[in-house]
Image: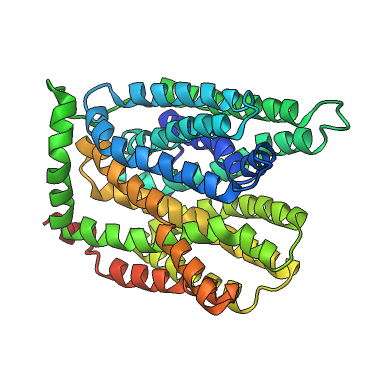
Amino acid sequence: MAKQKMTRAEKSWIMYDVGNSALVLLATSVIPIYFSSLAPDGGVVVAWSYAETVASLIIALLMPILGSIADMKGMKKKFIVGCVGTGVVATVALGIPTSAMAFLVIYVISSVALNSSMVFYDALLVDATTDDRMDEISSQGYAWGYIGSCVPFIACLLVVLNYDALGIGLQTAMQIAFVITAAWWLAFTIPMLRDVQQKHFKPREEHAVSRAIKGIGGTLKEMWTNRAIKFYMIAYFFYIDGVHTIIKLSTSYGTDLGISSTQLVLALLVTQFVAFPSAIIYGRLSSKYGTRRMLLIAIAAYFGITLFAALFLRTAMEFWILAILVGMFQGGIQALSRSEFGKLCPKKRANEYFGFFDIFGKYAAILGTFLVGTFTALTGNSSLGVMSIAVLFVIGFVMMLKVPAREEAAE
């Protein structure tokens, strides 16, 4: 059977992943380093951690409420416009402050806007495509996001690393980087706003905010009584916690082993390039072998990656091997997790459900980082700390086995 071509709506939905991924990559690499230059008195890790926590708390409080409102007719894209507009302005404004506190306040605003837009974007997947194509389209989104984010990131790196040669200061170089990133994000948002229409919605109602607040408990109860969603969300919480912990701590672990920052940044780029074809391949394999089976394979692979990092990772070459292994499965596990949840949740309330789904994802890495920190502190060995992450993949694997097939869950 000939492969079905992507529709215009599907292509345009994918483009948003290309746009927002530029800021995601910059925020996990260059921005924290720049922030340290604004806080010469120390306390960088603590201040940055608090800022990330505040942003996560704001998103956790807002998303179930805003998600419920966004499920109403014609509201999804309005929320995306509001989030992207706020985020783009805040990203450009990051180049203005010269004090650490002012920078953190603006960063929290941009982070909340970015991550909130992703909730609405994820929920728009059910409008952009059909159930039988969700794995493919979600995987394409992550894939093109990985490769697309490298274009502005490399441009930003060239400016930031060569600001002396260009005859400008570090702050000016970062201002240029922030403008490049914001413009990229905005440009790749426009096709989605133009071509993807909200097909699934619930009727508009009066007192929407108060109704949404009152309905949070009812939605949680619904999710808990649905056996497929309940076990899926528990599984997702644990295994995505492990995935995010590896992403967040890999560079600090590499630094602890004495690997140079240049090698670490280059390895990060390698992960992006490997993840591009891997995510697409993973999406296509899921249509042949089933989404749940491919998720189980990815969880098992991450278990193996964790053991490799703990037992064998000692040199830069082995860190590069780790980067390649992570790239092979990172996009697949994230993309299929998103698409599988899109098939399980009620389409007319996708935003509301994805609000909780993304909260589970955002708060993931709390347990993993706690385990790594605790075991490292107790043993004085960061390798044993890393090995503790493996238990998260074991629990995630077991819980995923308990998720019934969708046909069974629908009965």
Looking at the rendered structure, the number of numbered marks drawn on it comes to: 0
Residue 56, position as x, y percentages in the image:
40, 43
Which picture quadrant has residue 225? bottom left
Q: Residue at x 79, y 28 (%)?
A: 169
Q: Residue at x 55, y 36 (%)?
A: 18
Q: Nearer the viewer, residue 135 or 84?
A: 84
What color scheme is it?
rainbow
Indicate left or right for 63 with 223 as reference: right
Indicate left or right for 111 with 151 as reference: left
Indicate left or right for 288 with 146 as reference: left
Residue 51, position as x, y percentages in the image:
48, 41
81 over 289 or under it: above or below: above
128 over 176 or under it: above or below: below
Indicate left or right for 317 with 349 as reference: right
Quadrant for the C terminus in the image: bottom left
391 over 219 or under it: above or below: below
Residue 38, position as x, y percentages in the image:
66, 36
Q: Nearer the viewer, residue 104 or 90?
A: 104
